[in-house]
Amino acid sequence: MTKTLFADGRSVKLVAEELGGSDYISLNCYVLASGGLLRPCEMSEAKVRAFVEGLVVDLTGDASDQ
């Protein structure tokens, strides 16, 4: 998974590839005065939301453990 911040953190690009598979997730999220705006990239918003809501980030291991 790669997260890239733009515009001082007001824009986030997230790309994730399935380990051992061919599926992926790609999205942009914008922080606006009116609230957050989610823009999936070439996939359904439901798929992106399901991924983000189920995301668990393990900051204790390193990439070689994956």
Image (spheres, grey):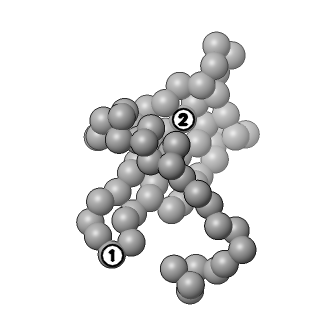
Q: Which of 46 and 27 is in front in this view?
A: 46
Residue on which the image places disc 2: 29
- Whether 55 is drawn above or below 62: the answer is above
User: Which residue is pictured at 29% across the width and 40% down the height?
Assistant: 43
Residue 7 percent coordinates (x, y) = 67, 37
Residue type at the position of mark 2: Cys
Residue 51 percent coordinates (x, y) = 44, 47
Q: Can residue 57 be seen in this view?
A: yes
Q: Say which mark, if any, is on residue 51.
A: none
Q: Please indicate whether residue 26 sits to the left or right of residue 3 in the image.
A: left
Residue 4 percent coordinates (x, y) = 59, 52
In which quarter of the view is residue 22 placed?
bottom left
Tell me if mark 2 has few (under 14), some (14-19) or many (20+) residues whose alpha carbon lies within 10 angstroms of its own: some
User: Which residue is pictured at 37% across the width and 65% down the height?
Assistant: 18
Q: For the residues carrying marks 2 and 1, which lies nearer the camera in this image? A: 1
User: Which residue is pictured at 63% across the width and 19% down the height?
Assistant: 35
Q: Please indicate whether residue 46 sits to the left or right of residue 63 in the image.
A: left
- Whether 7 is drawn above or below 31: the answer is below
Farthest top residue?
34
Residue 60 percent coordinates (x, y) = 72, 74
Cα distance between the residues tagged 2 and 1: 26 Å
Circle 1: element type: loop
Q: Are marks 2 and 1 in contact (CB under 8 Å)?
A: no
Q: Which of 3 and 49 is in front in this view?
A: 49
User: Which residue is pictured at 37% across the width and 33% down the height?
Assistant: 45
Residue type at the position of mark 1: Gly
Residue on which the image places disc 1: 20
